[in-house]
Image: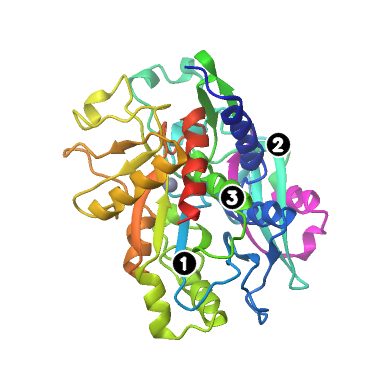
Amino acid sequence: MPVSPAALAHAEDLADFVAASPSSYHAAAEVARRLEAVGFTRLHEEDSWPALAGGRYVVVRDGAAIAWTVPTDAAATTPAQIFGAHTDSPGFKLKPQPTTGSRGWLQAAVEVYGGPLLNSWLDRELRLAGRLALADGSVVLADTGALLRLPQLAIHLDRGVNNGLALDKQTETQPVWGLGDAAEADVLAELASSAEVPVAEIRGYDVVVADSARGAVFGKDRAFFASGRLDDLASVHAGVVALADHETPEQGPIAILAAFDHEELGSASRSGAAGPFLEDILERVYANLGADGSTRRQAYASSWCLSSDVGHSVHPNYAAKHDPVVQPVLGSGPILKLNANQRYATDAVGTASWLTWCERAGVTSQEFVSNNSVPCGSTIGPITATRLGIRTVDVGIPILSMHSARELAGVSDLYDLALVAQSFFKG
Ligand code: ZN
């Protein structure tokens, strides 16, 4: 069945979002930029906040963003509907003393970030992007555009390569970015000039390597969408689209988008799901509505968190890696993720609620469960549930090539996830 024009438009908009979000810092800024453009107010954690009822707000903390809308009649026990996702993706991060090279080549010293499929990063034009902390105390975003490449060794020099390619994480992952003498070059100057600041002003940096190619729709009936960083910008984008469209009602839940950083490292940071960011925002929002510790927990008890991250579609060449019966496939809808060992937070009550939100959105969903012999990944859902005690459901979209520099999703699933997020925000 051909995908709808609305789903194709959503995929093109996601391509824009991913292109604008090469690092978690860019993603958080892009979330705020898009929401401010439709009337959200940017708040800062170091300020005191105005009365929040009836308004729409966004806060950025490092590479994470939390945005929310408060109904006009919201009170101390008004529940929250929290859509969670993450802004970071596996790849590489720039090391200290990053300019290296030899034999006429300029290289950049990088450290592996999370669990990328290393071979997928070969032979692509890559960009450096992230934030620079400057001598005057300010922080700016920088993005070089296509600058680097990890060139694969020619088959003539590695005749056994098709029996299996194993890259050394240190010696074989250092990208080239130019020609010349490393002693006379400075890769930080490329970042500084992209941000239009003097390189001597840079005091610190959080900079990652990202694929520079734009996402693209292709395949029979235009069913496929390939892009870098779909894990998990596809979910962040669905949440932003849904929240931007969410009218602030007089009554109903507080609708919240929580886009965390550092999921690929286990979420333990001040901007990660295991850190205090969401709890800090919730405490301030509920205090603003007149709640104390007791009434806030009343609100939590009737709240929901929909934790959205990518999951595995069945792969036709490796079907035995999946559960023999439960085999979600691209294009057949978002997935509900279940795991007996609580690697996903979904339970019976969460399943029933998810099906209601899907039904209201007119969306069909699929289930995901692991093959017992293939260990399951995890995500922000169980962490959020454990921290706050809020009922949590783990969901997402099915993809192939997870943690590749360029992953593969279904166009209709991306749009359907945004529709369910919209229905979820209504409570
Ligand atoms: Zn993820």
**Magenta stretch containing residue 273, yes or no?**
no
Q: Is residue 206 positioned above or below 13 on the image?
A: below
**Magenta stretch containing residue 193, yes or no?**
yes
Residue at mark 3: 240
Residue at mark 2: 178
Mark closest to the chain's N terminus, 3 or 1: 3
- Residue 167 position, x and y percent, is 42, 35
Mark closest to the chain's N terminus, 2 or 1: 2
| Residue nearest the observer in this picture, 389 or 426 | 426
Residue appearing at x 36%, y 39% in the figure? 335
**For residue 136, side relative to residue 309 (left or right):** right
CB contact under 8 Å: marks 2 and 1 = no
**For residue 35, side relative to residue 226 (left or right):** right
- Residue 415 position, x and y percent, is 52, 35
- Residue 196 position, x and y percent, is 83, 54
How busy is the neighbourhood of tag 1: few (under 14 within 10 Å), some, or many (20 plus)? some
| Residue nearest the observer in this picture, 176 or 400 | 400
Q: Is residue 89 visible?
A: no
How busy is the neighbourhood of tag 3: few (under 14 within 10 Å), some, or many (20 plus)? many
Task: Give me the C-alpha separation between circle 3 and circle 2.
Answer: 37 Å
Task: Give me the C-alpha separation between circle 2 and circle 1.
Answer: 34 Å
Q: Quadrant of residue 211?
A: top right
CB of mark 2 near ligand 1 (< 8 Å): no
Residue at mark 1: 269
Residue appearing at x 51%, y 76% in the figure? 75
CB contact under 8 Å: marks 3 and 1 = no
Magenta-tinted stretch: 184-212
Mark closest to the chain's N terminus, 3 or 2: 2
In the image, what residue type sits under mark 1? Answer: Ser
Q: Secondary structure at mark 2?
A: strand
In the image, what residue type sits under mark 2? Answer: Gly
